[in-house]
Image (spheres, rainbow, N blue to C red):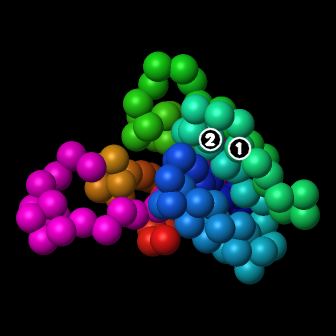
Amino acid sequence: MTILVAVTDDAEGAAALKGALAEGRRRDTDVVALNLRPEPLAVPSDARLTVVDRTFGVEDGDAVLERLEKDVEVDLLVIGLRRRSPVGKAFLGDVAQRLLLEAPVPVLAVKP
């Protein structure tokens, strides 16, 4: 049993990492952080966390879905959500929306 978290370079990515680590402690399981940031991910020393960098040139949503296909042990995906206006909610195409609809595992969506 593993938790996969998509970590982006913004407040939503930080919230997703924090949420995934809390859920990992609650479930007593390991967390795999898919680093979607351009720079290395700072890892807390006491966390049960493995960092995997995405493949260069692959879009964020594709990178997450590819990782889910490769790692059959993943049973939860954690993503960060951005606050959207009522008009913004009417338009699809957001990476988070795609992951919510296409992920083959349950998705925990957190906000900063």
3 relative to 61, above or below: below
Q: Which mark is residue 35?
A: 2
Task: Mark yes or no: residue 74 visible.
Answer: yes
The residue located at (45%, 25%) in the rendering is: 58
* Left or right: 20, with 29 as reference point: left
The residue located at (57%, 50%) in the rendering is: 7
**Image quadrant of residue 41?**
top right
Residue, far top: 57
The residue located at (65%, 67%) in the rendering is: 18
> Viewer-proximal residue, 87 or 107?
87
The residue located at (40%, 63%) in the rendering is: 81
Badge nearest the viewer, 1 or 2? 1
Quarter holding the N terminus? bottom right
71 relative to 75, above or below: above
Residue type at tag 2: Asn
Which sits earlier in the primary sequence, circle 1 or circle 2? 2
Q: Is residue 86 magenta?
A: yes
Query: Residue 110, how many percent across, how many down?
Result: 48, 71
* Left or right: 35, with 87 as reference point: right
Residue type at tag 1: Leu
Q: Which mark is residue 23?
A: none
Q: Which mark is residue 41?
A: 1
Query: Residue 21, how many percent across, how many down?
Result: 71, 67
User: Would you say the residues marked 1 and 2 are in contact, meaning their CB atoms lie under 8 Å apart?
Assistant: yes
Task: Mark yes or no: residue 27 visible.
Answer: no
**Helix, strand or loop under label 2:** strand
* Left or right: 109, with 21 as reference point: left
Residue, far right: 46
Give, as a single range, the part of the protein colored magenta: 71-94
* Left or right: 92, with 39 as reference point: left
Query: Residue 8, how many percent across, how many down?
Result: 52, 47
**Image quadrant of residue 39?**
top right
